[in-house]
Image: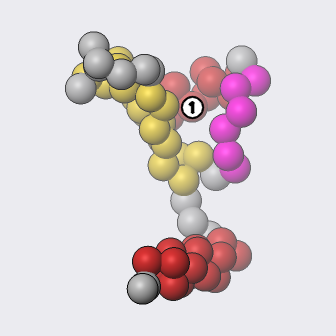
Amino acid sequence: MSAIQSGTRLVAALKAEGFPLPDHVRECRLVMTAQQAIVLQYDIFIGADDLARLGRALVRLADESTP
């Protein structure tokens, strides 16, 4: 796996082109391999408002994986 471009400059360039990124994107990476499609990975800040939603989502995953 190789990162072609990464960082905040990539985020700025994608936003300038109108690429749909979630709010609060901090950094992203463009990753390519010979065996798979181009993958865009990104990091976002999780604020206090999102923390409760994140916790509920994790509980939901735990509930779904419990037999």
Residue 5, horizontal then vertical, whole percent: 39, 21
Q: Is residue 29 above or below residue 64?
A: above
Farthest residue toward the left? 1
Q: Is residue 54 above or below residue 18?
A: below
Residue under the image location 71 percent in, 18 percent down: 17
Check residue 15 for magenta coloring. no
Residue under the image location 49 percent in, 42 percent down: 42
Residue under the image location 43 percent in, 20 percent down: 37
Residue under the image location 25 percent in, 23 percent down: 2
Residue 12, horizontal then vertical, whole percent: 61, 28
Neighbour class for label 1 at 10 Å: few (<14), some, many (≥20)? some
Residue 14, horizontal then vertical, whole percent: 63, 24
Magenta part mainly helix, strand or loop?
Answer: loop
Residue 7, horizontal then vertical, whole percent: 43, 33
The amino acid on which the numbered mark 1 sits, given as a three-letter code, is: Val
Out of 5 and 59, give the one closest to the viewer: 59
Q: Is residue 25 above or below residue 57?
A: above
Farthest residue toward the right? 18
Compared across the picture, whether 32 is left or right of 28 comes to left
- In the rendered image, the quadrant that contains the C terminus is bottom left
Q: Is residue 22 above or below residue 34?
A: below
Q: Report the residue marked by disc 1.
A: 11
Mark 1 element type: helix
Q: Is residue 58 visible?
A: no
Residue 30: quadrant of the picture: top left
- What's drawn in magenta, residue-wise? 18-23
Out of 62 and 1, give the one closest to the viewer: 62
Compared across the picture, whether 65 is left or right of 21 comes to left
Out of 64 and 33, give the one closest to the viewer: 64
- In the rendered image, the quadrant that contains the N terminus is top left
Q: How many marks?
A: 1
